[in-house]
Amino acid sequence: MDDTQEEGPSGWVKLISEDGFTFILPEKAAQTSGFFKSTLNSTVGFQESETKVIRCGERAAVLETVVEYLVFKAEFGHTSGKNTIPDFTKRIPAGLALEILMAADFLDC
Amino acid sequence: MSRRAAANNRVRGPTSALTEFLREQGISARALSGYTRRLVEEGEENEEQAEGQATAAGPSATVPVTVTLQESAQAGPSRSRATRGSTTNANGYTSDNLDGDEEPSPARNGRKRKMSDKEMAKAKAKAKAEFERSKKRKLNGGGADDDDEEEEDEYTAKSKGGVGVGKADGVTPNIGDRDECAECGKLYTFTKYTRPADPGPGYLCPACTKAAGHDLFKTAQGPRKRKENVTKRKIVFFEENDPVPTLAELCLETIAKHIEDVDALGDIGSLNMDKIAKIIAKNRRLNASVAPLFYDITNENLTLYDCTALESSGLIALANLNPNLVNLRLDFCGRVEATALGHWAQHLAKLKRIELLAPFLVTDKAWIKFFETVGDRLEGFLITNSPRFSQECVESLVKNCPKLTELRLRRIGKLEDDWLPLLHPLTQLTLLDLSDASLGNAPISLTDEPLIDLMSKVGANLEHLDLSGHELVTDDMLIRGIAPNMPKLKRLRLVELSNLTDEGVGAFFDALVATPLHWLDLSRNPELADKALVGLLDHSGAGLAHLNMNQFKEASNEVLLQIGEKASLLEFLDLGFCREVDDFVVKAVQDGCKGLKELKVYGCNRITEDCPKKRGVRIVGVESHPY
C-alpha cells in the first residue's frame, strides 16, 4: 500500500500473521497496543521500528480481529459519550474468543 | 433617637444586628447628616414628599422604593428634571425620581436635624434590607433568584436599552445624560431603564416607554452575574474511564456469554488452558460465570490463580463439577471457609493434594474436621497464610493423614517449637516448608535443637526444604540438622536467616551428604560471602539450575568469576546487590552457562552500559541502561 514509510505515528505499519497474511494499519492505531508501541519505539532500536513490518505469532483469523480492535480503539478511544460507541463484542467470534484473549494478553491491548 | 445619643456618648450597650451592621459599615448619624446636607443643597422637592417617604420607609425597605417609583412614574420625572436645568449632576439617575431612597430633602437648614433623623431611619431601613439580603444570599449559597437579580443589577449591570441596542446608531448616551425622546421629542434623563425606540434610532422617554407597553422598570436581561458565583463542585481526583475496554476484557465478556455452550468456544488443548487461567487471573475476572471454563468431570488437576471473586456457592460448585479431582490448587482463596472445605472433603473422593493460598477464614475446627474426613487419602497439604491453624490442627493432621509426603505450613502465625515433635511420625515427607512464621511485627522463630531433632527424624526422604525467615536458626542447625540427614535434598531455600555466617555456610556445604543441589536460594543473608559461595559452588555447582544469591554483598570478584565455570548448568541466576559484580562477571557467567535464560543484576552498580549480552539471555536490572 504505502511503501515509502513515513516517520512518526502518521505512517503505516504492516503486520504479518503466522500463516503469511498481511495487515496494514495506521501506526497510530497500532500504537494502542502496548506490545506494538514498544516494538515501534525508535529509541529502543528494534529493527521493526525502522522497517515498520512486524511478524506476529498469531494466525490470520485471530490477528484480523486484533487489527480490527486496534483501529476501533484508535477511533473511539477518546470519545466521551458512552452511547456513541458501538459494541465491539459482536465482532469477536465466540469460537476464537480464547485465542484472541491470549493474543490480546500478549499484545497488551 | 436614644440610640443616636448613645453613639454620641460612646457608651455602648447591647446592640441589635442592625446597629452592629451600621457601625461596621461606618454609617453613623453624623455621616448621614452630612449626606443629607449635600442632598439638601441639591434638592428641590418639597419636604412633604420626603416626609411621606420617610414614614413609609418604616419597617421595610422595599415599600418606599415602590411607592416612589409609582409616584415618579405618574409625575413624569423627565419634565420635573427638565425644569431644574443647571442642577443636573453626575448622579442624574438618582435624581430623576426613580430611586426613592435618594430623594432630595428641603433646602432650609432649620429642617436639617429633623430631616437627618428621617434620612437615618430610611438609611437604616435600607441597610437592614441590604443586610438581610446579603444574609439570605449567603444562606442560599449565592443562588440567584429574580428579586436578587433586579437589585443586583442596579449598579453593576449595563442596561440593555442603553448600551446593547444603542450601539447600532453609534451614539449611546451615558447614564445621566440629557437626551431627546425619539417619540415625543421631550428632553429626559437617560437612565439604565431607558429603552431604545422600536423602529430606532434613538431612545424613548419614560412616558413613551410606558405608552409603548413596556414595563418601565424592567432592565432587560442584564448580564446574570450571579450565575458565576454558583460554587461548582471541584473534583480533585477522578478516574478517567477508558470508554473502550481492553480487548482482553471484551474477550472475557464473550467467553462469559458463551460459557454454557463450551463447544462454541472451541478447544485449544490443556496446556493453553493453564495459560488462559493465568490471563484471566491477571485481569482479576475469574468469577462464577467464567470458572466453569476450567471445570470438567474428568479433571484430575485444577489450578485457579485468583479465586477472590469465587464465593462460597461457587467453591461448592467447583467440587460438584470436578468430582474426580486429585490435585487442587487455589490461590487467593480468602472466601474458602468451613462449609466449602467440608464439602470438598466429602465430595472430592480422590483428592490427594490440596494447596491453598490464604485460606484465612477457615477455623481450626474446620481444619480438624477436614483431616478427619479426608483421612489417609491426603498426601499433600500445602497452606500459606492461615493464622487460625493451631497445634490441635497439626495433631489431627499427623494422626489422620499418615501418608503425608508434602507439608507446607507457611506464614502460620501460631507456629512454635512445640509443634515440631508432632511432625516426627511424618517420615515419608519429601517436601517440608515451615518458612516465614512471623506474621506482622511479632517475630516468631523456631530454634536449633527442635529443628535438628525433626531433621534427623524426617530428613531421609526430603527433597525440598524451606526454613526461611527463622532468625534464631544458626549454622549449627545447618551442619548438624540438614547436612548429615538429607541425602536426597534437591531444593533448599534458606532466605533471611540473619544468624548464618560465612564460615558456617561454607562448612555446611562441605559437610552436606546430598548430591549436588538443583535449586538453591540463599538470598538476603548479608553475612554470606566468599567461603559460602566457594562451598556451594564446589558442592552443588555441577547440578545447579537455579541460584539466588541476592545480597552476597562481600563476595569478591575472583570468586564471582568462578560461577560461570563451576555452575555451567545455570538457567536462572540472581546476583542482585553483590557489589563486586562487574561486566567481566556478567561475561563469565554468560560464557560459562550455556543454558542461561535470566540474569538479575539489580543493585550491581559496577556494571556499565557496555556489559556484554548474549542472545537468549534476559539481563534484568542494569542500572545504566536507559530502559
Image (spheres, coloured by chain):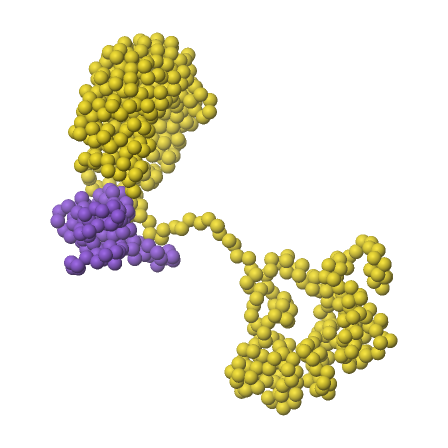
B253 or B205, which lies in front? Answer: B205
Quadrant of the rendered image containing residue B53: bottom right
Q: In the visual, does B198 lie left or right of B151?
A: left
B124 or A40, which lies in front? Answer: A40
Quadrant of the image for the N terminus of chain A? bottom left
Residue B273 in view: no
Quadrant of the rendered image containing residue B390: top left
Q: In the visual, does B422 lie left or right of A21?
A: right
B349 or B217, which lies in front? Answer: B217
Residue A41 x %, y %? 26, 49
Residue B222's place in the image compared with B212, above or below, is above
Residue at x 84% of width, y 76% of height: B109
Residue at x 21% of width, y 28% of height: B589
Extreme residue in the left direction:
A20
The tint chain B carries is yellow
Q: In the visual, does B564 lie left or right of B116?
A: left
Residue at x 29% of width, y 27% of height: B580
Q: In the visual, does B158 lie left or right of A26?
A: right
Residue B393's place in the image compared with B257, above or below, is above
Residue B287 x %, y %? 34, 38
Residue at x 31% of width, y 37% of height: B623
Residue B51 x %, y %? 81, 75
Quadrant of the rendered image containing residue B311: top left
B146 or B597, which lies in front? Answer: B597
Residue B319 x %, y %? 31, 29
Residue B617 in view: yes
The tint chain A carries is purple
